[in-house]
Amino acid sequence: MAQLHSLRSAQIVDINAIKMVFSVPLELDSDHIVVLKLAESTDRGDVMIGAVTVKGILENTKWGTERVERALELLLKEGMVWIDEYNSERAYYFPSLCL
């Protein structure tokens, strides 16, 4: 962990049983952490582990669509998720979790 001091904006986040290091120049809020946890634990058959959909987030939280989209928008803007559209549903993949 001492080596992380050279990454001035590094943040260590517990995602279920995994410790992840984020070195993006922003602070992740609790909404982003919830989305990451859902992506890490996805095993419902609709998307692979490491990915989420708006529908999946809505089903697992009590959030509205706007809140889900706001959280995903920042993660997308910062390059932390990739988008894949298939059968008219958009999936958001976290390369750090699925590759």
Image (cartoon, grey):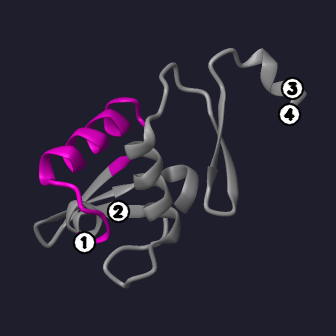
Residue 50 is one of the magenta-drawn residues: no
Within 10 Å of the Cα at label 2, are there few (<14), some (14-19), or many (20+) other Cα atoms? many
Q: Secondary structure at mark 3?
A: helix
- Tags 3 and 2 in contact by the CB under 8 Å rule? no
10 Å neighbourhood of mark 4: few (<14), some, or many (≥20)? few
Which mark is first along the chain, 1 or 2? 2
The residue at the point 40 percent across, 62 percent down is 51
Q: Position of residue 9 (x, y in %)?
A: 62, 19
> Mark 3 touching mark 4, by CB under 8 A?
yes
The amino acid marked with disc number 1 is Glu
Callout 1: SS: helix
| Residue 70 position (above or below residue 43) | above
Mark closer to the chain start, 1 or 3? 3
Where residue 77 sits, quadrant-wise, is top left
Amino acid, disc 3: Gln
**Mark 4 vs mark 2, CA separation in Å:** 29 Å
The dot on residue 1 is: 4
Horizontal and vertical percent position of residue 48: 43, 73
Instruction: Look at mark 1 in the image and give the residue it sits on.
Output: 59
Q: What residue is disc 3 on? A: 3
- Give the mark count: 4
* Secondary structure type for disc 4: loop
What segment is highlighted magenta in the picture? 59-82
Between marks 1 and 3 in the image, the one whose residue lies nearer the viewer: 1
Separation of marks 2 and 1 at Cα, in angstroms:
11 Å
Q: Could one spot residue 66 in this view of the protein?
A: yes
Residue under pointer 2: 52
Tell which circle, 3 or 2, labels the residue nearer the N-terminal end. 3
Q: Is residue 59 above or below residue 4?
A: below
Q: Which three-letter amino acid code belongs to the residue tagged 4?
A: Met
